[in-house]
Amino acid sequence: MGNRLTEEEQRRQTSPTPYGDIFDEAFPHYLVMGMTAEQYWDGESSLKTAYRKAYRMRIENERRLADQNGWYMGQYIMQAIAAVPLFVAGFNTKGAHIPEYPDKPFLEKAEEEKREKEDQKKQEDQSKLAMAMFQSMVAKLNRNIEKRLQEEGSGQ
């Protein structure tokens, strides 16, 4: 595909990069994502957005799987280390201990912490809203009481 402009057209062009070059540069990235050449060049533009989103999802799923597999491998290694009495005894004689192994894969633990923070923020927001509603109700009640007192005072 390359450069589509003649030298004269390039001199007249205001943009430093012609659109064709931008599309040419992006093309290999979409091929890696699994898009065919026909889909890229002749398909709808919304298809490109869907491929990018699907690609990001696939990468995230692969990261999760790798993290989980690493966690399982660590569990197996810790079990193997715990099965060697001399190794464990060597740690205990020096006063050191085998560090506790994480109970969940790192990404899973991070997501759980994120969910907990979000839940805590929701609860705080609900508490603030309830407090504001209560204060509003108390203020309205106080105004009604003052109004009645004024009416009783002016009625006498």
Image (tube, helix red, strand yellow):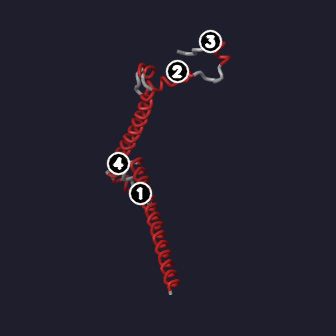
Reading the image, the residue beneath label 4 is 75
Q: Residue 137 is drawn in which quadrant?
A: bottom left
Q: Earlier in the sequence, mark 1 or mark 3?
A: 3
Spatial CA distance of label 2 from label 3 is: 17 Å
Q: Position of residue 81 (x, y in %)?
A: 35, 50
Spatial CA distance of label 1 from label 2 is: 45 Å
Label 3 near label 1: C-beta < 8 Å?
no
Reading the image, the residue beneath label 2 is 24
Spatial CA distance of label 3 from label 4 is: 63 Å
Q: Nearer the viewer, mark 1 or mark 3?
A: 3
Q: Nearer the viewer, mark 3 or mark 4?
A: 3
Label 3 near label 2: C-beta < 8 Å?
no
Label 2 near label 4: C-beta < 8 Å?
no
**What residue is at 37 percent from the left and 55 percent from the top?**
88
The reply, left or right, for residue 119 in relation to residue 7 is left
Q: Nearer the viewer, mark 4 or mark 1?
A: 1
Q: Position of residue 10 (x, y in %)?
A: 65, 16
The circle on residue 92 is none
The circle on residue 119 is 1
Residue type at mark 4 is Gln
